[in-house]
Each structure stands twice: as structure tokens, then as C-alpha cells.
Image (spheres, rainbow, N blue to C red):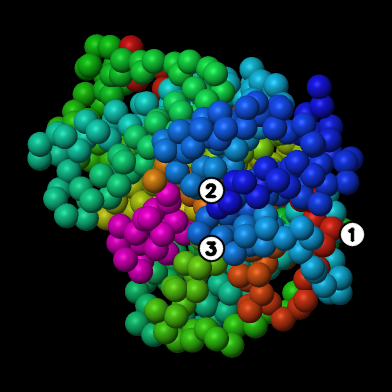
């Protein structure tokens, strides 16, 4: 009997795995879910911009893009910390900057000649002298990163790459928890991010890149990323 | 969420879908009944289960083994926090009790979720073991004998459980490749355990422990008694790439080790939790 895997070749307009992932995208993914399920057409995408590539390389480039964004953000944060920062916060944010740079450089080297170029970021809407603005942005980036890695897991074919993504996502989750606690102690895993089954969020690349887009000037083309 | 739309889309590819899910009404009833226990966010798993039934696929032994293993660990954590919250005078009221209660609730939700997932795959969830949180293998006089009367001991054991749980889920992820919604659900639990770990570590720091939200080297911040939960975290090289000082960046050894959490095998995890299981 044919199963979901072997039926891949059929010319289905709907990719089963991808709508399962849309279904898992959480409240923010409802619009995408509706688009994916109700319209009998593929989502239209622009084919210009930096192409992330396909297969596991595409997913690694996707992660590399997100790590570039995070590393650039924390580098800027640490170049001139917000007003009134405590010594403890300075140390923690410096640590996070180093972790994100380590992630970025790791992906750059791991991808080698397949790596996308450095992305140009746009932080014009962030007030880097404001604790609220910096931590609010950090929280958004960290939660987004966690959901991005969680959602990318099923798109990765190679066990070693999946493990590497796992090694990084839990560090991003530690960052997310810490940043959230700096904003409001006890919010490390509140109902904004954890559902009634005790599960964190996962998001698909298109949704993640859409959320990150206002912060990235360079156009990114995710057309060839695996859908399942 | 329009489930009927999804079925209609599948029908375009597989005209026999309704025979596979036969009869449709029964499948939908099963699905909705299942959905009452499993909220929207776990829909991928629920749908995956329904499709597995429809296409006569059974969960692989690997997937079941992972879920049973995860359930055992979640039983451990859930009972630990349940007893901790119930222990009069152990956890200070206010933020500490609030945080531990949040974590307790998540662990109980994980237990319920994993049990439901196993049952939906036609498997019988393993029963809850009897635990000895003193790590005394049933003597209740192990090294953590005061775990429910001494707050610092309680937090130390909590940190160890959370950091170990993160490593356990991470180690099992490759066994779930191809399992779709099950892998995603496991990853979605994995990151919650990491959030817990970070918070517990900050709670310990506030009480004077020398720890950060992330794991530095193979430092326990507790002592040799829990070293096995941290061995291997000191890795400076990932996939053959040295992270310390990578590409001329000022990445210290500490930062290089903190930036990546490391997996443990099932056997390593079972050895770590063995003293806690009677």
C-alpha cells in the first residue's frame, strides 16, 4: 500500500507535510494556514534575492541567516549598552552575543562555498539606548529562533545536522528564557509561547522569514527550501 | 482550522482517501474525540496519527521506544515538582513558588501528552515507576535525602533534571527522523525543558550558586555527584569546526562550550536517573 512518503511523486497541489507544519505554526500561523488549505494554488513567491538553496544546505543557510540577524543585533547592543544596564545584564548580554557569533561563524564554515553572503540588517526601528526596546527585540528574536529551529527539524534529512540544530535550539531557548525573565521574572515559559500541552512553538521558514523581514534589508529567496 | 478542506485537498490526489479513512464520519469522530484531549497546537501529531491509521502505517518501534523513554523521564520530573510544590515550607511563596508551579504544570502536561500520543498510536504507555528523589535507589537516604526539606537541594536536583532532560530529548531526535509530527512535538518539548533549565539556574544563581542560564564547560555548579549529567558539555569543536576563536572572533572557550548543548544517549540517561528509580 502506498503511504505518505511514496506518494510524493503525485502531482498534488497540496503538500501534506507542509500543511501539517502550517497546522503546527500556532496562532500566528492561522492566516498562513488558511492560505495554505483553502486556496488551490501554491503560495506565490518572488524568485529574486539571495537564494538559500535546497535540501539540508538550504536549511543550514536558513539557520545561518537567522544567526546573522541575531549576532548583528547583539553586537550592536554590546557596542553601546542601553541606559541603566546592570553589570549582571551586561555580562549576560555579552555572553549571548558571543553565542550568536559562534553560531553564525559555525554555519559559515560548515556551509563553506554553499554559504549565502553576509546579510544587510535594518535595526532602524530599535532604540538601542532603551532597555525596553532592546530586551523586547531580543525576546522576539529568541522566541522566533526557537520556533524556527523547532519547525525546521522535520525538514532536515541528515541526523548529524538535526543533532546540530538541536544543540543550538536549546541554547536559544535558554537565551529566550533569560531575556523573558529580565523583562518580567517568571515569564520564561509563559502562555505566550507554551501551549496547554506544555509544548513550545514551531514555525515554518516562510513564516519565520516573514516575521524577520522588517529587520533584514537583503532580500531572501526561500523558494527552494524543502517543504517536507 | 478547516479539517474538511484538508481532506478535500488530499482527495484530489488520492481519491480513495475516504475509503482509507473508512468511514469518513467515524474517522472524523475519532479525530474530534482525540482533539478534545489534544489541543490545537498538537494537531500535527493528531493528524499524523489519523493518517497513519488511514494508510495502515504503524509507528515504528523506534518511535514508540522514544515516546516511552520520554514518558518515563517526564513522570520523574512531574512527580518531583508535584511533591516539591506540595512540601510545606519548601519553596518560598511568590516568584519561586510561581515558577516551580509553572514548571510542574508543564511536566504534568508532557506526561499527559505523551500518554495520549502513545495510546493514539495503539501503544500502551509505560506505568509510572516508583521514585526515590534522594537518589538512594529506594532507600530514601541517598545523597539528596533532604531534597523536599532543603530548598537549595531541591533546586540543585531540579537543575540536574532539566539539563539532563534537554540532553535526553536532543539525543533522541535522530531516531524520530521521518516521524513528522512526533519529531516536531519532541522538539517542542525539548525547548521547553531548556527554558525551565535556564530559569532554575537563575533561581540558583540568586541564592549564590555559581551558574549562568547556560552550561559552561562541564561545570555542574552543584558538585561531583551530578557530574555525569554535564560530562561532554565541554566540547569546543562542532562537526570538526573549532568554535573557540573561530574565524578570528573573540570566542572564549567558555562561550564556545556554552553556545552548544550536547546530547546524551538513552543508556547514558538511564544510568543517570537509575538512582532515582526504585
Query: Is the residue at mark 3 from the same chain as the one at mark 1?
Result: yes
Residue under label 3: A28
Q: Residue furthest left?
A: B89
Q: Report the residue at 25% width, 44% height from top.
A: B101
**Callout count:** 3
Q: Quadrant of residue B112?
A: top left
- Residue B220 is marked as none
Tag 2, which secondary structure? helix
User: Where is residue A219 drawn, in percent x and y?
Assistant: 77, 76
Tag 3, which secondary structure? helix
Give the Cα separation between the discs numbered 2 and 3.
22 Å
Residue under label 1: A113
Q: Earlier in the sequence, mark 3 or mark 1?
A: 3
**On screen, residue B62 above or below B257:** above
Report the chain holding disc 1.
A
Query: Horizontal placement of B243 versus B194: left or right?
Result: right
User: For the C terminus of chain B, which image quadrant?
Assistant: top left
Amino acid at each position: 500500500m502506498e503511504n505518505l512518503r511514496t506518494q510524493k511523486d503525485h502531482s498534488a497541489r497540496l503538500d501534506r507535510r507542509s500543511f501539517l507544519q502550517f497546522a503546527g505554526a500556532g496562532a500566528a500561523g492561522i492566516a498562513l494556514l488558511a492560505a495554505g488549505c483553502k486556496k488551490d494554488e501554491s503560495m506565490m513567491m518572488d524568485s529574486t534575492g539571495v537564494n538559500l538553496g535546497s535540501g539540508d544546505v538550504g536549511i543550514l543557510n536558513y539557520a545561518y541567516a537567522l544567526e546573522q540577524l541575531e549576532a548583528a543585533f547583539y553586537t550592536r547592543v554590546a557596542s553601546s549598552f542601553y541606559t541603566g544596564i546592570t553589570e549582571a545584564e551586561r555580562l549576560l548580554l555579552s555572553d549571548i552575543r558571543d553565542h550568536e557569533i559562534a553560531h553564525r561563524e559555525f554555519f559559515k564554515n560548515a556551509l563553506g562555498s554553499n554559504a549565502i553572503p553576509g546579510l544587510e540588517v535594518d535595526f532602524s526601528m530599535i532604540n538601542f539606548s532603551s532597555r525596553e526596546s532592546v530586551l523586547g527585540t531580543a525576546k522576539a528574536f529568541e522566541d522566533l529562533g526557537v520556533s524556527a529551529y523547532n519547525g525546521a527539524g522535520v525538514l532536515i534529512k541528515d541526523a548529524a545536522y538535526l543533532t546540530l540544530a538541536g544543540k543550538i535550539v536549546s541554547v536559544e531557548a535558554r537565551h529566550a528564557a533569560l531575556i523573558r525573565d529580565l523583562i518580567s521574572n517568571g515569564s520564561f515559559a509563559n502562555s505566550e509561547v507554551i501551549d496547554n500541552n506544555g509544548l513550545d512553538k514551531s514555525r515554518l521558514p516562510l513564516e519565520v522569514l516573514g516575521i524577520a523581514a522588517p529587520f533584514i534589508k537583503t532580500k531572501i529567496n526561500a523558494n527552494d527550501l524543502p517543504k517536507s | 482550522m478547516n479539517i474538511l478542506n484538508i481532506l478535500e485537498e488530499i482527495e484530489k490526489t488520492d481519491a480513495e482517501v475516504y475509503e482509507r479513512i473508512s468511514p469518513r464520519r467515524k474517522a472524523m469522530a475519532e479525530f474530534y474525540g482525540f482533539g478534545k484531549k489534544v489541543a490545537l497546537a498538537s494537531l500535527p501529531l493528531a493528524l499524523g496519527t489519523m493518517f497513519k491509521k488511514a494508510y495502515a502505517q504503524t509507528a515504528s518501534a523506534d518511535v514508540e521506544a522514544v515516546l516511552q523513554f520520554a514518558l518515563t523521564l517526564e513522570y520523574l520530573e512531574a512527580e518531583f515538582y508535584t511533591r516539591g510544590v506540595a512540601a510545606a515550607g519548601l519553596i518560598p511563596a511568590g516568584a519561586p513558588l510561581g515558577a516551580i508551579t509553572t514548571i510542574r504544570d508543564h511536566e504534568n502536561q508532557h506526561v499527559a501528552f505523551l500518554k495520549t500520543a502513545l495510546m493514539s498510536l495503539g501503544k500502551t504507555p509505560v506505568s509510572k515507576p516508583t521514585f526515590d528523589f534522594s537518589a538512594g535507589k529506594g532507600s530514601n537516604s541517598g545523597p539528596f535525602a533532604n531534597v523536599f526539606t532543603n530548598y537549595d537541594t531541591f533546586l540543585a536536583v531540579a537543575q540536574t533534571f532539566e539539563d539532563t532532560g534537554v540532553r535526553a530529548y536532543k539525543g533522541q531526535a535522530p531516531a524520530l527522523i521521518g516521524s513528522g509530527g512526533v519529531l516536531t512535538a519532541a522538539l517542542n518539548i525539548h525547548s521547553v525543558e531548556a527554558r525551565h533549565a535556564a530559569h532554575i539556574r537563575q533561581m540558583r544563581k540568586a541564592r549564590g550558586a555559581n551558574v549562568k542560564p547556560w552550561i559552561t564547560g562541564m561545570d555542574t555548579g552543584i558538585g561531583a555527584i551530578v557530574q555525569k549529567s554535564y560530562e561532554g558539555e565541554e566540547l569546543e569543536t562542532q562537526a570538526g569546526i573549532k568554535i573557540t576563536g573561530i574565524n578570528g572572533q573573540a570566542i572564549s572557550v567558555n562561550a564556545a562550550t556554552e553556545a552548544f548543548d550536547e546530547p546524551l544517549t538513552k543508556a547514558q540517561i538511564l544510568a543517570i536517573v537509575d538512582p532515582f528509580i526504585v
